[in-house]
């Protein structure tokens, strides 16, 4: 198979590409990425000598560039390309609409035009919105409450419309909060780790009791590949790690592991507008296909801490001014 992976220089996308090249030796990958702030060329630099890997710099909103890439002969498109950070969506919602909504439309049109065998849209649990109890199922209504989650929900609906209207062979995965190596340091876990390494305080929204379900990036990538190969077209699959924790518990773990103190290294900042209190995923559908997460949460988290400790050359060059605004609470995470 020949894969077109959009957003392949990013966090989950780069792990997905590595998984394909490691475990599907007959497959080839075109990495199509606009190289934005979160698309780090270092994530795939060592793959450039692999004849099965080819990088193309391009924007998924550019129909000509997308069609040129797809016309080379593609069997499957996996769309990781997206603006993803909720706080950035509050500051600049237009860029999220452009990339997440228009970009998905451009890709779907290319799938139609060139008869691509499969299109997989990588989505998020945030499209379900806040859930006070229980777990969200794939059939539940969408209730996004931020510009980010609304843009992802809009993309999902487009994907399903192309299945119903044009019989385009589509799949959607909705993943829970993802952590691991090579994640741009603006999300909770990498931001807190890098701040604590530098002996800086970490910003915690409100009381910190917002609850999220966590999955290791390698498990998430493996789940996406599993659904691409075994999922039924026209369907949605939740991919969660089964590790629900309030943000304050994650914070305490990281502070302790990095030998700091909650009293001196945690700053409570004003809660974000429209902040969802809780997400949780019902993953019975994906588990019925034979997929299970493999990496225990605390072990994966400790390995992630160790990676950031030993890879300062990777995260220190990441947009220092942007990181500073997040670190000081002018922009935070949750």
Image (cartoon, rainbow, N blue to C red):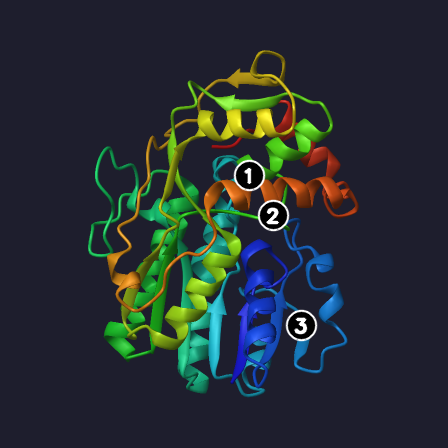
**Is the residue 94 above or below the residue 250 in the image?**
below
**Is the residue 90 above or below the residue 78 in the image?**
above
Residue at 64% across / 20% down in the picture?
260
Q: Are marks 1 and 3 in contact (CB under 8 Å)?
A: no
Where is mark 1, residue-wise? 187
Residue at 60% across / 56% down in the picture?
10
- Count of numbered tags: 3
Residue at 56% across / 16% down in the picture?
262
Q: Are marks 2 and 1 in contact (CB under 8 Å)?
A: yes
User: Is residue 300 left or right of 288 when viewed as pictured?
Assistant: right
Q: Residue lying furthest top in this view? A: 263
**Residue 88, image x, y percentages:** 53, 38
Q: Secondary structure at mark 1?
A: loop
Q: Which of disc 3 and disc 2 is earlier in sequence?
A: 3
Where is mark 3, residue-wise? 56
Q: Are marks 2 and 3 in contact (CB under 8 Å)?
A: no
Q: Is residue 62 visible?
A: no
**Residue 254, image x, y percentages:** 57, 30
Between residues 119 and 27, which one lies in front from this camera angle?
27
Front disc: 2 or 3: 2
Between residues 293 and 182, which one lies in front from this camera angle?
293
Where is mark 2, residue-wise? 183
């Amino acid at each position: 198979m020949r894969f077109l992976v959009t957003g392949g220089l990013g966090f989950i996308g780069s792990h997905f590409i590595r998984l394909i090249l490691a475990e599907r030796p007959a497959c080839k990958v075109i990495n199509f990425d606009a190289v934005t702030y979160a698309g780090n060329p270092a994530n795939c630099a060592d793959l450039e000598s692999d004849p099965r890997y080819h990088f193309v710099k391009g924007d998924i909103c550019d129909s000509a560039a997308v069609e040129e890439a797809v016309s080379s002969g593609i069997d499957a498109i996996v769309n990781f390309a997206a603006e993803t950070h909720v706080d950035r969506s509050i500051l600049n919602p237009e860029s999220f609409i452009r990339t997440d909504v228009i970009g998905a439309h451009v890709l779907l049109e290319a799938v139609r035009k060139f008869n691509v065998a499969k299109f997989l849209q990588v989505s998020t649990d945030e499209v379900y919105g806040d859930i006070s109890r229980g777990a969200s199922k794939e059939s539940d209504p969408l209730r996004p409450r931020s510009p980010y989650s609304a843009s992802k929900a809009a993309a999902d609906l487009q994907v399903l419309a192309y299945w119903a209207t044009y019989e385009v062979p589509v799949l959607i995965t909705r993943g829970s909060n993802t952590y691991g190596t090579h994640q741009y340091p603006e999300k909770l876990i990498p931001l807190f780790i890098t701040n604590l390494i530098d002996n800086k305080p970490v910003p915690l929204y409100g009381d910190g009791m917002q609850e999220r379900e966590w999955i290791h990036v390698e498990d998430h990538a493996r789940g996406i590949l599993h659904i691409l190969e075994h999922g039924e077209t026209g369907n949605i699959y939740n991919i969660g790690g089964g590790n629900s924790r309030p943000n304050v518990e994650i914070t305490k773990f990281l502070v302790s592991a990095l030998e700091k103190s909650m009293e001196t290294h945690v700053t409570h900042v004003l809660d974000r507008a429209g902040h969802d209190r809780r997400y949780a995923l019902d993953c019975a559908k994906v588990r019925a296909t034979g997929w299970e997460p493999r990496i225990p949460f605390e072990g994966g988290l400790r390995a992630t801490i160790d990676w950031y400790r030993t890879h300062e050359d990777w995260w220190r060059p990441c947009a220092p001014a942007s990181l500073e605004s997040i670190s000081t609470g002018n922009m935070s995470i949750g």
